[in-house]
Image (spheres, grey):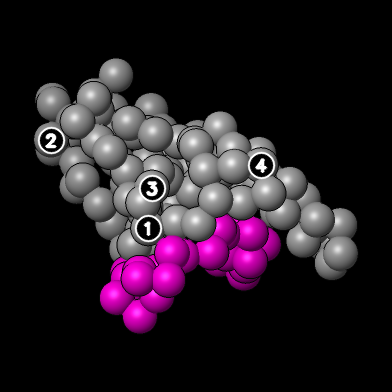
Amino acid sequence: MPRSAFAETLPPTERPPRRGAIEPGKGKTPLYILAWRFAPLDLLPGPSGGNPIDFHDDFVHHWADNVRAKPVEHMLQRPAVLVFFTGAGDNYVYFVAASNNEDPAKLDLSDIEYARAALPKLAPYAVGELDVEAEFKWYRRVKN
């Protein structure tokens, strides 16, 4: 079955099956990421700069600072910043808090607070116009 048998996006509370799990009538579950999605121009450059690699470095650094400041007993998902996640025409930057490479059923949404606190600042024109939480969802990988 094609990946199109699976939803392109899901709300944060509707967790996809683990990647590779066989779903009756659909086939193998593709990769999903739980992320915030932004147009790069809607973001202010961070301490490292304003390209995707810089956003990644700053996001992971701030996430790690948040974890060190208030550690928890269980291991959290790995944060990352991805581009072109849904294919070559995808011009968004994804700030990833989790994926279905790990069992999504074990994900505690309170863990996401570390990642939320590490997000970059919005450009002044985007503040008030962009609903950050509306962009937070599970995104399916469309192409390899």
Q: Residue at x 19, y 41 (%)?
A: 6
Front tag of 2 and 1: 1
Q: Which residue is mark 4?
A: 48
Which mark is first along the chain, 3 or 2? 2
Residue 17 seen from this side? no
Q: Residue furthest bottom?
A: 128
Q: Which residue is mark 3?
A: 40
Q: Dot 2: what SS?
A: helix
> Disc 3 to disc 1, how far (Cα)?
5 Å
Quarter of the rendering containing residue 84: top left
Looking at the picture, tell me which residue is in the foreground, 33 or 62: 62
* Marks 2,3: beta carbons within 8 A: no
Q: Dot 4: what SS?
A: loop
How far from the left and from the top, in percent, is residue 15? Answer: 39, 55
Does 113 appear in magenta?
yes
Q: Which residue is mark 1?
A: 42
Which amino acid, mark 3?
Pro
Q: Which residue is mark 2?
A: 4
* Marks 3,1: beta carbons within 8 A: yes
Which amino acid, mark 2?
Ser
* 113 relative to 15 in the view: left or right: right
Q: Tag 1: Cα neighbours inside 10 Å, few (<14), some, or many (≥20)?
A: some
Which mark is first along the chain, 4 or 1? 1
